[in-house]
Image (spheres, rainbow, N blue to C red):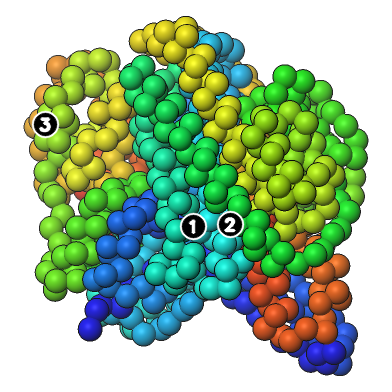
Amino acid sequence: MSNNVAINVEHVTRVEGHGNIVLNIKKGKIEQLQWQVSEAPRFFEAMLRGRHYDELRPITSRICGICSIGHSLASLKATEDALDIKISEQTEVLRRLAINAENMQSHILHVGYLTAPDLFGVGSVFPLVGSKHQDALLKIVKLHRLFNEMSDLVCGRTTHPIRLIVGGFSAIPTEKQLHNLRQRLKDDLKTTKEVANVLNSVVDNFPDFERETEYIALSSNDEYAFYDGDITSTDTGKHLDYKDYLSVMKEYVVPQSTAKYAKHVRESYMVGALARFNLNSKQLRPIAKEVANLFGLKAINYNPFMNNIAQLVEFVHNIEDSVLLIDRLIDKGIKDEKPVNFKLKAGQGIGIVEVPRGILVHDYTLDDKGRCMKANCVIPTNQNHANIQKDMEEFVPQIIDKPEKEIELALEMLVRAYDPCISCSTHYLDVKFV
Amino acid sequence: MKPRVAFFDFASCEGCQLQIANLEGEILDLIEIVDVVSFREVMKEHSDEYDIAIIEGSITRPMDEKRLRKIRRHAKILVALGACATIGGVNKIRNHRPVEQVKKEVYGDTDFKDNEFFDTFQTKSINEVVPVDCYIHGCPINRDEFKQVIIALALGKKPEVPNYPVCVECKKNENVCLFELGKFCIGPITRAGCNAICPTNGSPCDGCRGILQKPQIECIMDILEKYDLTYEEMKRRCTMYNMSIFNPSEGMTFARRGSK
């Protein structure tokens, strides 16, 4: 047994943002174990005060470089809800393509660039160049490029989308471009399966750890929910009134973190790919189900490390779903639509979407001139921080006999499994403007 | 020996570093000419021995200011990456309000005395804390521009930053001027280098690359007059990326607030 352990990982690597792991064990007893979030707070909701309705989307996009499309969509849904704007069917289908593109690029970035090095026993993807895993790396790079090009095509740019505006799009892809994208997506399903096989050969390098917890995600009767659905919990079922989201996502401040923590009926809950899988796996598309079976992933799975595999399963689903969405667009014919007309009015609007790391809420109150008087954003990673802490508390006693370096790596891998987006999560707050 | 490059980040969305990952296969070309010795977002290894430090993000806390000064001491060349670093980015939107007020709105009455994580001051761009040798503008940065800058630095050259308005690139792309379509674009006073990506996608320029060194004030006044637009609206459009402008009729000139 390691009698004395002193781990202080300042700024965990290969995650988005700044988080620290602190573990002190004296004479075999855990004296301190903390997941700390040290990211500089950016006060986003305070920035929104007084801004015009058409600036809320571009400003909140800057909360996160990785999920800027997700923030943009939550923001547009909230703004359009407040202004009673009904978007066209074509706009909705294009937005669904945008959310798929981001989910795919974010998941392959995480699984391929950030997690895979742990499975292959290296510090980053760079040493994989010229190794026996080079072929797998090149396949991952190819997929990442395709998904980014898909974001470029639908949103005008990979990060901080341009074309997504209140009431519609400022520019749209052509039918020819969509045909071309459809073909490449179909071709890359094969590449995806090959990547899945390579990862399956090393998946046993994930620790075998389980902890029962609550999972929260959007669910829909019609589909595996991303763009729309009802807030649903594995403990309490569906919560139909979306305006009452704060009764599910109860936040609180802790001194070790500039991001707030959240809980529902237990001490913590988890959101993200594993939560969505645990609630909605029956609605996955066929090849995504095959990939889940390849890894033996079944709902409910309580191993947080399997969030990585749930992400892999989801991006296969996103590819299959995108092909069908493109078919729908092409069948109906692409129309050069203007954004819908609307009148400014005072009111509150709430937008909820599933983004790569889980359920995201934007909630705005506008005055009659379209200015934002109150804003609240509930960020996925923020909802996961407490669950990471609780996992660590149960995980450390199970691995306490291992050498210090192994404990450190296992804890870093645990944090990485959540794919935390820490820059994002330090922006949660509930602001009341006077 | 190849120059050693290290990446660091402060208050930001990390979207600019993500653009480097988004270079995909071309990263492999870049690591032929430079050694990446630290890049927390994608690698575990870290070294304090570096020649070029590339900084993303704004400075908002004493602990971050201290860290930045240390990086400056280690680096021969310091590069500000993206709008948060070059001009303070959207992080400066909150600067017109007192820090204590903003903090209270965010964290309520919780007492964080002596907790350095929460010790925040007004947002600063990198050059408001330490000297900067090279700027890569944009929110997010343009991937091709990043590549060109790294190649220039590896060859020991000083990279060139465009100092003409976005309109030049917009015209080259043969776009219809957005003012003609009833939109309010601040491309005429914003530094180019983005290939006018926003106007080309039908959305007005928000000014993320910062204001030109010498914006053509007469030209702006002509545009406002021609399209019957107000000076107040112009001022509002300039606040997202902290371009502070004053009314020329009052004898003042355009200037960027809070930078050198």
- Give the left or right position of residue A227, taking residue A214 as reference: left
Between disc 2 and disc 3, the foreground one is 2
Q: Please state which amino acid type lies under the numbered disc 2.
A: Val
User: Residue A415's quadrant in the figure?
Assistant: bottom right
Secondary structure beneath disc 2? helix
Dot 3: chain letter: B
* Label disc, if present, on residue B172 of the rendered structure: 3
Tell me whether marks 1 and 3 sit on the same chain. Answer: no
Q: CA distance from mark 2 to mark 1?
A: 7 Å
Secondary structure beneath disc 3? helix
Q: Please state which amino acid type lies under the numbered disc 1.
A: Ala
Residue A233: give x, y in percent of width and height: 84, 37
- Give the left or right position of residue A12, taking residue B81 as reference: right
* Label disc, if present, on residue A136 of the rendered structure: 1
Secondary structure beneath disc 1? helix
Dot 2 corresponds to which residue?
A: A198
User: Residue A172's quadrant in the figure?
Assistant: top left
Instruction: Tell me whether circle 1 and circle 3 mark residues in contact (CB < 8 Å).
Output: no
* Label disc, if present, on residue A208 of the rendered structure: none
Q: Is residue A408 above or below residue B213?
A: below
Instruction: Tell me whether circle 2 and circle 1 mark residues in contact (CB < 8 Å).
Output: yes
Give neighbour class at mark 3: few <14, some 14-19, many 20+ (Cα, 10 Å): few
- Quadrant for the C terminus of chain A, please: top right
Please state which of residues B103 and A37 is positioned toward the viewer in this rendering: A37
Q: Please state which amino acid type lies under the numbered disc 3.
A: Lys
Residue at image coords 86%, 58%: A211
Tell me whether marks 2 and 3 sit on the same chain. Answer: no
Residue A330: give x, y in percent of width and height: 44, 13
Residue at image coords 66%, 37%: A288
Give neighbour class at mark 2: few <14, some 14-19, many 20+ (Cα, 10 Å): few
Q: Is residue B232 above or below residue B100?
A: above
Q: CA distance from mark 1 to mark 3?
A: 41 Å
